[in-house]
Image (cartoon, rainbow, N blue to C red):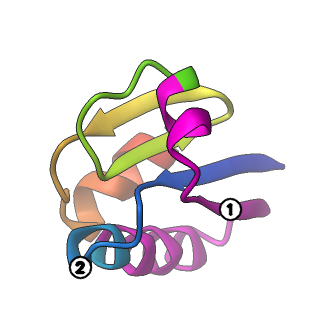
Amino acid sequence: MKKIQVLGPGCPNCEKLAQATMEAAYALGIEHEFEKVTDIQKIMSFGVMMTPALVVDGQVKVSGKVPSVEEIKKLLA
């Protein structure tokens, strides 16, 4: 099971990334645990300075932009 986290304070781009990530995970049919992290201290603990950010199994995959659903699928695979 993959642990997928979207880091961000709740801005529109954070919401877009969360939606696209869920769409990609369901399209791939992978078992996953999804979490939105909005606490700034927690976000900074990942070393992320620009949000939104996507973290998969504890590893930051992308930050500061919203990738397409197809790009996210590649990051999750």
Q: Could you tell me residue 70's position as x and y percent?
A: 25, 63
Q: Could you tell me residue 10's position as x and y percent?
A: 40, 72
Is residue 33 one of those drawn in magenta? yes
Q: Which residue is label 1 attached to?
A: 35
Label drawn at residue 75: none
Left or right: residue 45 compared with residue 54: right
Considering the whole magenta stretch, tell me its main secondary structure. helix
Left or right: residue 61 compared with residue 6: left
- Work out whether residue 8 or residue 17 is closer to the camera in this orientation and state it: 8
Q: Which residue is label 2 attached to?
A: 12
Query: In the image, what residue occupies the spot 23% across and 79% down?
Result: 12
Query: In the image, what residue occupies the spot 30% across and 37% down?
Result: 62
Q: Tell me the crowding category of disc 1: few under 14, some 14 to 19, or many 20 or more residues within 10 angstroms, Cα based.
A: few
**Region rendered in magenta:** 17-44
Query: In the image, what residue occupies the spot 45% across and 28% down?
Result: 60
Q: Could you tell me residue 64's position as x and y percent?
A: 18, 43
Q: Amino acid at mark 1?
A: Glu
Q: Could you tell me residue 50's position as x and y percent?
A: 23, 37
Is residue 16 one of those drawn in magenta? no
Q: Tell me the crowding category of disc 2: few under 14, some 14 to 19, or many 20 or more residues within 10 angstroms, Cα based.
A: few
- Work out whether residue 65 or residue 21 is closer to the camera in this orientation and state it: 65
Tell me if label 1 and label 2 are in contact, CB under 8 Å.
no
Left or right: residue 71 compared with residue 45: left
Q: Picture quarter containing residue 49? A: top left
Q: Secondary structure at mark 1?
A: strand
User: Would you place residue 21 above or below residue 54 in this image?
Assistant: below
Q: Secondary structure at mark 2?
A: helix
- Work out whether residue 6 or residue 39 is closer to the camera in this orientation and state it: 39
Spatial CA span between label 1 and label 2: 17 Å
